[in-house]
Image: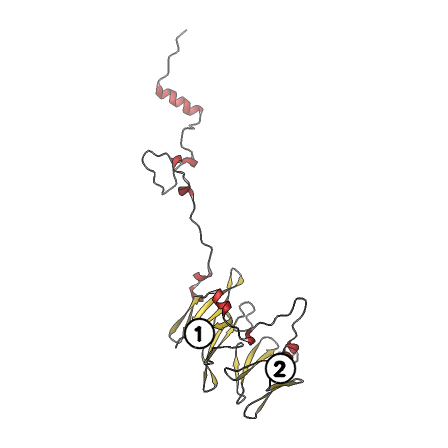
Amino acid sequence: MYPLRPLPAPLLLGGLCLLTSCTLRMQPAERARPGVSLPPGLLPTQAQTPAATQKRPVPPPSPYRFTHLDTLMVGERVVRLYPGSREAYEQLPVQEWLINQTASEGDELDPEAEERRRLRKATTAQRAGRTLALRCANGKAVRLVNNPTENYDTSVLYEYVATLPRIHHWLIAVRLYEGGYYLLVDQQTGRQTVVWSPPSVSPDGRYFICGSSDVLARYEPSGLQVWRMKAGRPQLLWERQTEWGVSQPRWLNGHTILFEQDFIHNGDVDTRIMRLTLPD
């Protein structure tokens, strides 16, 4: 018999690699992350500290990335809209005719009953059957007659909403076969002005805003109108139809409003508070 001799070191290592399928080779989990530099002499497994493996927080998607929602062109001027505070908005006074009337749970809202309730507070407006009569200061009587038909072109209903003391107008809702609009009727002369929505009147009565929101059905224009009272008459300064809607505008001061901006986001209607300052 021949005595066993130890194998040379290179051959011994080669055999071990074959038996273990080279388990000494670095596994993928042990590899250093791309872009992570290791100090001299530090093994890749030692680099897997919590600081190295922690992922950066990813902010949620925000509708504010849509910059076209945040500017308006007024003539050659750019009017910028800024995010507003919901807390500040909720603390601002709400004009009575801007409060959304909703029915109690299980009941239906009765427009005729609501109008009768409002007319009890009015001294210069009254209803007789289909006719809504408004008595002007100059003695003129404005009569608005309902015509409830199934005809798309002729069906119309007039509903008394409120008397606006700061601008001395009556506010009338006009219901058409589909959609509608609002009328401002001058209490002095009976002159009628068509507006998009019930106006939010500035504290000094010099301006009022009409905001409209119908971003889903799109029967009505969405956007806002800015009016100024000049010599007792409403004067339209500018209006813009937009991709987003304006609801419940409230005055922060004589030139700045906060409002709810309704817009489509991820296929649904979302709302945020925005702030707009009227240009001079």
Please say whether residue 157 is visible from this viewpoint: no
| Residue most extreme to the left | 40
What crowding class fits label 2: few (fewer than 14 Cα within 10 Å), some (14-19), or many (20 or more)? some
Residue ID for mark 1: 253
Front-most of residues 268 and 154: 268
Q: x and y percent of residue 118 in the render? A: 61, 79
Q: x and y percent of residue 201 in the render? A: 49, 78
Please say whether residue 9 is visible from this viewpoint: yes
Residue type at tag 1: Asn
Q: Is residue 76 left or right of residue 127?
A: left
In which image quadrant can residue 70 be found?
Answer: bottom left
Could you say whether the residue bearing mark 2 is in a helix, strand or loop? Answer: helix
Q: CA distance from mark 2 to mark 1?
A: 31 Å
Could you say whether the residue bearing mark 1 is in a helix, strand or loop? Answer: loop
In which image quadrant can residue 124 be found?
Answer: bottom right
Q: Which mark is residue 66?
A: none
Q: Which mark is residue 119?
A: 2
Q: Is residue 210 above or below residue 143?
A: above
Residue at the (49%, 65%) spot, across then down: 87
Residue at the (44%, 69%) spot, across then down: 275
Front-most of residues 32 and 187: 187
What crowding class fits label 1: few (fewer than 14 Cα within 10 Å), some (14-19), or many (20 or more)? few
